Amino acid sequence: MERERLLSAPFVLCSLANLAQALAFNLFLHFPGFLDGLGASKVQIGFIFGLASAAAILVRPPIGRSMDLRGRRGVILAGGTINVISCSLYLAVTSVGPLLYMNRIVHGLAEAMLFTSLFTYAADCVPASRRTEGLALFGVSGVLPISLGGLLGDVILARADYTALFATAVALALASLLLSLPLRDRLRLASHESEAPRGFRAALAQPNLVPLWWIGGVFATALACTFSFLKLFVEDTGLASVGGFFSAYAGAAIVMRVFFGWLPDRVGPKRVLFPALAALALGFALLAGADRTSDVLVAGVLCGAGHGFTFPIVFGMVVTRTRDADRGSAMAIYTALFDLGVVVGGPGFGFVIGASGYSAAFGAAAALIVVGATIFALWDRGR
């Protein structure tokens, strides 16, 4: 039997729009260095990162409901417009003060709208029989910018300053908005004639989704350790670079998704999920004991390989267990977990680093993955 086609014009265009906005967003892997230059402490840096994520969490319920009732396109375009405005406002920030805090909130709103709507749009485009593979392939447009954002930021800051970095983010945000203009809703609301959307709370409390919220939250919280503090780790230790680590990270994730993205659909998602989580935990453990640049790069490969499978597998399981009429709300919850992870993990790991150092923080992230995966395995057993 012929396999259903993955690539379509809307899928490719959505992927390009996501690539551009994600590259703009991942230039902010260097943002801790900017904040450090303004005199912010590590706990303050964690709080400032968490502020954007807290705003993103609060706006998720109306985003999900809007997508379920009115479609995805309006949220995509509104989010893209706000993103351009927010990236522009960073050019006016000169101190840790009200403008910075306000703009982090605005940036969080834009990120929430784009992350949720573009991934939901991609889920609408892929056939159910190849769902995990399709979402993994789409996810390349979100993972590749992790590497490119780190490398591009390294190049910009070696030759210019943070003003140039923020100006580049503005240009990329604008490119994403322009690429989004031709997108039209794929999953029409005709299905809602027999299935009315139940809303954000119903999706949040749906029994077979709750274990997925748990493991997604654990995964997201652990990631906050590297995404919030890797910049300061490499500056303080002199090991590797932001671009080097995240290139290894993204390269491994892309290899997993492009060449092995079919595996979860063929053998079962959980049979791939648990080894992926183990690779992620091992990567954090290696970072905890790193004393050479090669240790950091190998840790990047392990973390990237784990991320490369974990995100699309849990994403695909959420889509499979959710009614079409509730997909927007479910995607809003799933993407909100990554902001919740920053809210919890940013200040939390910042406190651990301040009290006991980077090794303790990376070790805590590894332990969190192991304990969280064990709880999930017992909780979701039989499904």
Image (cartoon, helix red, strand yellow):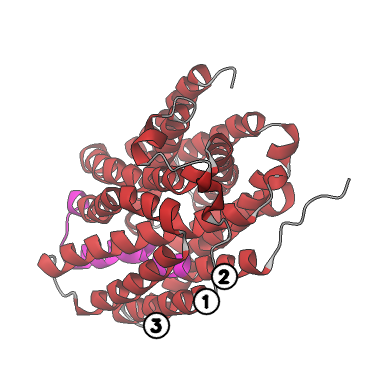
Q: Secondary structure under badge 1? A: helix
* Marks 1 and 3, how far apart at CA: 29 Å
Return the residue at label 3.
Answer: 159
Mark 1–mark 2 Cα distance, whole angstroms, equals: 7 Å
Mark 1 or 3: in front is 1
Mark whose residue sits in front, 1 or 2: 1
Per the image, the residue denoted by label 1 is 179
Q: Earlier in the sequence, mark 1 or mark 2?
A: 2
Q: Amino acid at mark 3?
A: Arg
From the top left corner, tell me how far across and down residue 103 is, in percent: 21, 67
Most frequent secondary structure within the magenta stretch: helix
Would residue 322 be found to the left or right of residue 252 on screen? Answer: left
> How far from the left and from the top, in percent, is residue 52?
26, 56
Residue toward you, 250 or 19: 19
Query: Image height check: is 140 above or below 160?
Result: above
Residue 379 or 76: which is nearer the viewer? 76
Question: Is residue 234 a member of the stretch shown in magenta?
Answer: no
Quadrant of the rendered structure where residue 21 is? bottom left
Range shown magenta? 21-44
Q: Looking at the image, which residue is at 45% across and 58% down?
A: 117
Q: Residues within 10 Å of mark 3 (few under 14, many from 20)?
A: few
| Tag 1 near tag 2, CB within 8 Å | yes
Q: For mark 1, does the 10 Å Cα neighbourhood hold few (<14), some (14 to 19), or many (20 or more) residues?
A: some
Residue in the picture at 44% in, 51% down: 68
Distance Cα–Cα, label 3 vs label 2: 27 Å
Q: Position of residue 200 (x, y in %)?
A: 36, 41
Contact between marks 1 and 3 (CB within 8 A): the answer is: no
Q: Nearer the viewer, residue 116 or 299?
A: 116
Mark 2, residue position: 16
Dot 3 and dot 2 residues touching (CB under 8 Å)? no
Which of the two discs, 1 and 3, labels the residue nearer the N terminus?
A: 3
Residue 97 is left or right of residue 266, and the answer is left
